[in-house]
Image (cartoon, coloured by chain):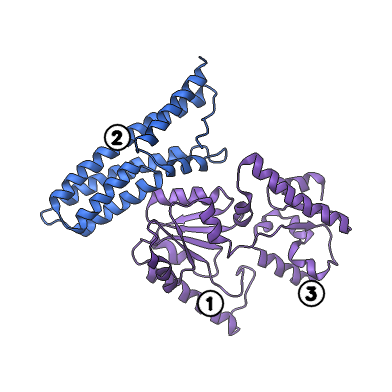
Chain colours: A blue, B purple
Amino acid sequence: MEIVAKLQKQFMEFISALYREGFLDDQFLQLQKLQDESNPDFVFEVVSLFFEDSEKLINNLAAALQQPVVDFKQVDSHVHQFKGSSSSIGAQRVKNACMAFKSFCEEKKIEGCMQCLQHVKHEYFLVKNKLETLLRLEQQILAAGGRIPDLS
Amino acid sequence: MSSTERDELKSAGIVDHVLAKPVRLSGLITCFQEAIGYRNKKQVTRGKPSILGSLLTGKHILVVDDNVINRRVAEGALKKYGAIVTCVDSGRLLAHLNPPHKFDACFMDLQMPEMNWTTRQVRNLENKYNEKVDSGELLPSMCAKVAHWHTPILAMTADVIQATNEECMKCGMDDYVSKPLEEGKIYSAVARFFKSVPLLVVENESRCPDSWLPLLLLDDLAAHPKHLHLPFELLYSIKIDLQH
């Protein structure tokens, strides 16, 4: 099989699995639609911003939950930010984990919050790994002179 | 104006058609037909909704959001339809919406702290400016695009509940759009504020029928394409000024 076609098939299978397993939702599709010739690196740029911001938020959350007196309002504001950016990028499972996290913040339950942080972290690193693979596949397709398959 | 210049204006999407003088009814009809046909074709071949494009092209939009990722995504969505987007965080909002300014509309995240207060401040600044214009203290100059300032402020929100609309209106916002921004949502939010007007350039026009004025741009303006991104109201007033 021709290399481009092979990569394209691999890409389609990979991204379909990401939707099927709930890692990504329609919002990621929307992002891909916003990318065009005038804006060729849009998805890469937004995804990189997401990685950078998420890792900062995870560190801030860990630090905030380790305080002798936990400021739940501050924890909630970090989680809110995380929920907003994961929703903007279509990282559905991270978003859902953030929503559960928020309700523990409201109830001011430290144990629940600690567990949620672990869950959010776990989901974040999973989707990060998947997105990196996806973007690498895109690069390989482009480098081989192919086009990214239309997903809609 | 040479045919190359005309083509440049058209392909840049600045005008829909250039009408050669003298203006004849047949030419006018063809040009309207072409303007409509051209749009339809563009929609098919480029897959871009040119209806929203014709509303947003060249419009200055201010996006206010404290989340850098949301800001970038909103910017991407609005730029896709030709808007000129400026992104700031909530701290910079007032400085940008103090009249006179260049923005045709503002999209702001509803969940940021102090947003209600800030929106009221924007309205206060606008009212003060408008009062000064009304009292004759300030002349609505060329840089002040309109005589009466009211920048459409649209809230972006992820959770639309019954109370959202009421809440937005109460603090002086004009409407809200649910996040994530999509074409249809942006369209229905901005359609009330922006008119979709096919712009024509008439060469060397000095005696247009008055009823055409809103559709016509002076040749002088056509010679300076940067002016063509001015808001419609201003083009109209320049036309009037030059006539008198």
In the drawing, does residue B105 fall left or right of residue B70? right
Q: Which amino acid type is marked by label 2?
A: Leu
The residue that disc 3 covers is B244
Q: Which mark is residue B236?
A: none
Q: Secondary structure under badge 3?
A: loop
- How far separated are the C-alphas under marks 2 and 3? 68 Å
The chain to which mark 2 is attached is A
Q: Do circles 2 and 3 both sit on a common chain?
A: no
Q: Earlier in the sequence, mark 3 or mark 1?
A: 1
- How far separated are the C-alphas under marks 3 and 1? 27 Å
Q: Residues within 10 Å of mark 2 (few under 14, many from 20)?
A: some
Q: Residues within 10 Å of mark 1 (few under 14, many from 20)?
A: many
- How far separated are the C-alphas under marks 2 and 1? 53 Å
Q: Which mark is residue A126?
A: 2
Q: Which amino acid type is marked by label 3?
A: His
Q: Which mark is residue B129?
A: 1
Classify B51 as above or below B141.
Answer: above
Quadrant housing residue B202: bottom right
Q: Position of residue B206 (x, y in %)?
A: 84, 65
Q: Position of residue A73 (x, y in %)?
A: 22, 59
The chain to which mark 3 is attached is B
In the drawing, does residue B184 fall left or right of residue B17? left
